[in-house]
Amino acid sequence: MKIILLGAPGSGKGTMAQKLTSELKIPQISTGDIFRKNLKEETPLGLQIKDILNSGGLVPDEITIEIVKNRLAESDCANGYILDGFPRSIAQAKALDTFQNIDCAVNLDVDNATIVSRLSGRRFCPECSGTFHVSTLSDPSVCPVCGGKLIVRKDDSEETVLERLRVYETTTLPLIEYYKARGKLLTVNGTGGVEVVYRRILDVLHK
Ligand code: AP5
Ligand code: MG
């Protein structure tokens, strides 16, 4: 199955993609994780996009599209994948249509107050890309999966979250209509606990 996860920053795309990837045995392709890895390793790409990521803007379409196109051509994507954070603009969606035929776009619908509360408590593991919320961690500094040191993502500062929400509303939100018009949109209520939302996603995927 070739699935896109749509949704605002903090709507739960990464959390749900990690659960889907282990259940459906298809890879999670997170453009945010790819960019953060390049940033951490200070690759030429990482240095080029550092300021964009830290300010909450979008990496230029041509760079992002090329990375995703190459990644989806790898053998582990042959039976499907979960796209987490791509596409994020109409130009990216149109480009994707030229090299892949996706099955559905699942939109996680979450209100802004929930988003702000989720992002302000998020902890991220740079070692395994695990994403957690402080409210569920016995030790908020240690990754419960790999033992790595958890960090607060730089783009989770209040100012940057507001910018990411603004960019989402102007550039990414139109994708909902884009996939609706193509009969590929599945909308899921993204509020509620992790397991509740995950069940809802499995239900719409099985229909
Ligand atoms: P990216 O990493 O994709 O960030 P994002 O879209 O802003 O999304 P987030 O990762 O913040 O949120 P999420 O929906 O994954 O939520 P999560 O599961 O973590 O992109 C980062 C940057 O990279 C962008 O700003 C941009 O610069 C660049 N970029 C990436 N893709 C790009 C593209 N295609 N084009 C151009 N630039 C691109 O959950 C959030 C928190 O809530 C966690 O703490 C989690 O534990 C908790 N939580 C999740 N679900 C629940 C639940 N049901 N109940 C309670 N808590 C929950
Ligand atoms: Mg994410």
Image (cartoon, rainbow, N blue to C red):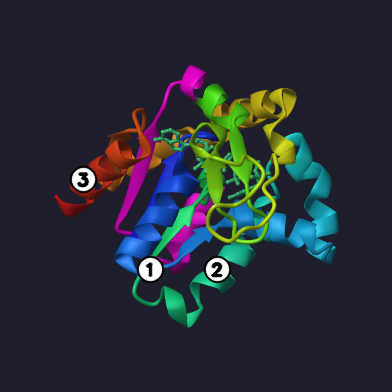
Q: Name the residue under label 1.
A: 26
Mark 1 or mark 2, whichever is nearer to me: 1
In the displayed structure, 196 sits above or below 82; it is above
Asked if the beta carbon under badge 2 is closer than 8 A to the nearest atom of ligand 1, the reply is: no
Say if the magenta span includes residue 11.
Answer: no
Q: Earlier in the sequence, mark 3 or mark 1?
A: 1
Q: Where is residue 122 in the image (x, y as percent from the top left)?
A: 59, 36
Mark 2 or mark 3, whichever is nearer to me: 3
Does residue 181 appear in the picture of this structure? no
Q: Residue furthest bottom?
A: 75
Q: Give the range drawn in magenta.
A: 91-114
Q: CA separation, marks 2 and 3? A: 27 Å
Q: Where is residue 121 in the image (x, y as percent from the top left)?
A: 59, 30
In the displayed structure, 202 sits above or below 127; it is above
Q: Mark 3 points at which residue?
A: 204
**Residue occupying image coordinates x 44% and y 21%:** 111
Identify the amino acid type marked 3.
Val
Say if the magenta span includes residue 93.
Answer: yes
**Residue occupying image coordinates x 44% and y 55%:** 18
Q: CA separation, marks 3 and 1? A: 18 Å
Identify the amino acid type marked 2.
Lys
The image quarter containing residue 199 is top left
Q: Which of marks 2 and 3 is nearer the N terminus?
A: 2
Q: Mark 2 points at which residue?
A: 69
Q: CA separation, marks 1 and 2? A: 17 Å
**Residue occupying image coordinates x 36% and y 28%:** 191
